Amino acid sequence: MSSSLALPSQLTLSASLILYPLAFYTITPTDPSPSRFSKSREAISFSHCLFVSLLSIYELRRQRPHWSPPTTLSPAPAKDDLTNGANLPLITVRSAFSNSITALEIGYLLQDAMILILGARLKSRAAGAKGRGLWKEINWRVLAWHHAGIATALGVLQWYIARGREKGVLVIVALMGMNLR
């Protein structure tokens, strides 16, 4: 049971898995120093953050009727109402464009994780270390907590998108709009 909103997100994920490494390959010299390699990664990272933030802001403006406060106040929910806002439009709205933004983020995180590992390998080789030196050069906090954690959470979201059961995608897009911090 696939959702019609899933195809754009799957296409975006596929495209980002191809285009981000291609962009990195294009701006990185053939035999880069660890410093130059890192600068290429930072250039892709900055471009991605700017692009995703602008897309997120655009999508939030486009979806404003779903998240802006109502013009009239509704009565307070009954004490036995257990939904606690789970049925608010901000949570329930579905958007192919929002889904694609989250897919773009997964593609970037997977590409960046590989670049972090390759960068650590390059730095380890430049320092003359062999074997376990690679493991010491990897920034595990960034790689494990940020990249693996967020990519996994967004991957689960993509699984729900493929089944047409995603919720809260606008909240996630709002958080992604803060990428430019």
Image (cartoon, rainbow, N blue to C red):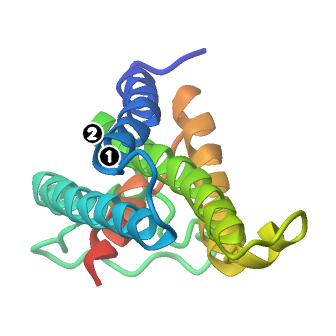
Question: As rendered, which of 66 and 104 lies closer to the eye?
Answer: 104
* Residue type, mark 2 in image: Phe
Q: In the rendered image, is residue 94 in sight? A: no
Please determine whether, in this image, residue 81 is positioned above or below residue 108.
below
Q: Quadrant of the C terminus?
A: bottom left
Check disc 1 and report the residue beneath it: 98
Q: Residue furthest front?
A: 128
In this image, 106 relative to 163: left or right?
left
Q: Kindly identify the residue that appears in the image at 51 percent across and 56 percent down.
A: 112
Contact between marks 1 and 2 (CB within 8 A): the answer is yes
Q: How packed is label 1: few (under 14 Cα within 10 Å), some, or many (20 or more)? A: many
- x, y percent for residue 63: 18, 53
Instruction: Please report the residue visible at 44 percent of the width from the left and 42 percent of the height from the top.
Output: 103
Q: Nearer the viewer, residue 46 or 54?
A: 46
Give the residue at x 60% y 51%: 114
Task: Examine the rendered structure and indicate whether residue 33 appears above or below residue 30.
Answer: below
Q: Position of residue 146 (x, y in %)?
A: 60, 71
What is the x, y in percent for residue 55?
Answer: 19, 54
Given residues 87 and 93, the one toward you in this image is 93
Residue extending farthest to the right is 132
Instruction: Identify which residue is drawn at 23% across, 59% down.
Output: 56
- Secondary structure at numbered mark 2: helix
Q: How many numbered tags mark residues here?
A: 2
Q: Position of residue 43 (x, y in %)?
A: 29, 64
Looking at the picture, tell me which residue is in the foreground, 84 or 141: 141
The disc placed on residue 97 is 2
Q: Estimate how packed mark 2 is, as few (under 14), some (14 to 19) or many (20 or more) residues with alpha carbons within 10 Å.
A: some
Q: Is residue 96 visible?
A: yes
Give the left or right position of residue 33, taking residue 62 as reference.
Answer: right
Q: Quadrant of the N terminus?
A: top right
